[in-house]
């Protein structure tokens, strides 16, 4: 579903069957195993992206946003209605580092659930904008591009838009 180049001549792949790492220097594949609760090896991973600090971010269909720091710990960010600091509902389908070192995650799902999520890795706080607050009838964000700090082009299931999260200003392209 997605690939990103990692440190030490590695290529990381998010698949429908979990996370796989290809070591270019040896030609060997490694299937990532997470022995605690099988979050990685049994989940659909839609997107993988390394940030400037070397952390691997994975957007999944049913396990939320996962972060891997090449340690034995795996941090999970997901939607939990009872937790204020959680992602919008739906699967995490896009993960990118944006200006200021923050991580932007889009989620999508049925009936217009999902939205725009900005994670500050320094404070571990998530700012959210649900899809229904961005524009009526947006069922999900397929992809986005940051044209300048705080300005985005987003592709949805219906149209393309310019979007400014700070003001929630959206214009159809």
Image (spheres, rainbow, N blue to C red):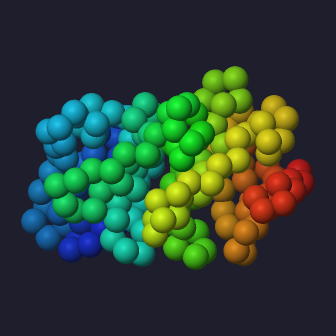
Q: Nearer the viewer, residue 153 or 40?
A: 40
Residue at x-position 85% and y-position 35%: 136
Residue at x-position 66% and y-position 43%: 115
Side (left or right) of 70 relative to 94: left
Side (left or right) of 6 relative to 134: left
Q: Residue 24: x, y in percent?
A: 19, 66
Relative to residue 49, is residue 41 depicted above or below? above
Q: Nearer the viewer, residue 84 or 106?
A: 84
**Is residue 87 in sight in this rendering?**
no
Residue at x-position 33% and y-position 50%: 75
**Is residue 7 in sight in this rendering?**
yes
Quarter holding the C terminus is bottom right
Quarter holding the N terminus is top left
- Disc tally is 0
Q: Residue 3: x, y in percent?
A: 38, 55
Q: Residue 88: x, y in percent?
A: 60, 39
Q: Residue 10: x, y in percent?
A: 24, 66
Residue at x-position 28% and y-position 62%: 69
Side (left or right) of 90 relative to 150: left
Side (left or right) of 70 relative to 124: left
Q: Nearer the viewer, residue 111 or 72?
A: 72
Q: Nearer the viewer, residue 70 or 9?
A: 70
- Residue furthest toward the top? 111
Relative to residue 41, is residue 53 depicted above or below? below
């Amino acid at each position: 579903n997605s690939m990103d180049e990692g440190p030490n001549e590695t290529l990381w792949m998010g698949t429908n069957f979990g996370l796989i790492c290809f070591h270019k220097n040896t030609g060997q594949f490694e299937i990532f195993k997470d022995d605690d609760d099988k979050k990685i090896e049994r989940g659909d991973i839609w997107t993988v992206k390394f940030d400037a600090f070397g952390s691997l971010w994975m957007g999944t269909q049913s396990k939320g946003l996962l972060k891997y720091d090449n340690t034995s710990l795996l941090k999970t960010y997901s939607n939990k209605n009872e937790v204020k600091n959680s992602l919008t509902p739906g699967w995490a389908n896009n993960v990118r580092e944006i200006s200021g070192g923050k991580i932007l995650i889009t989620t999508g799902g049925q009936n217009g659930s999902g939205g725009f999520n900005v994670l500050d890795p320094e404070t571990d706080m998530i700012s959210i904008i649900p899809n229904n607050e961005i524009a009526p009838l947006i069922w999900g964000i397929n992809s986005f591009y940051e044209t300048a700090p705080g300005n985005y082009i987003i592709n949805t299931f219906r149209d393309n838009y310019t979007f400014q999260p700070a003001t929630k200003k959206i214009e159809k392209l």
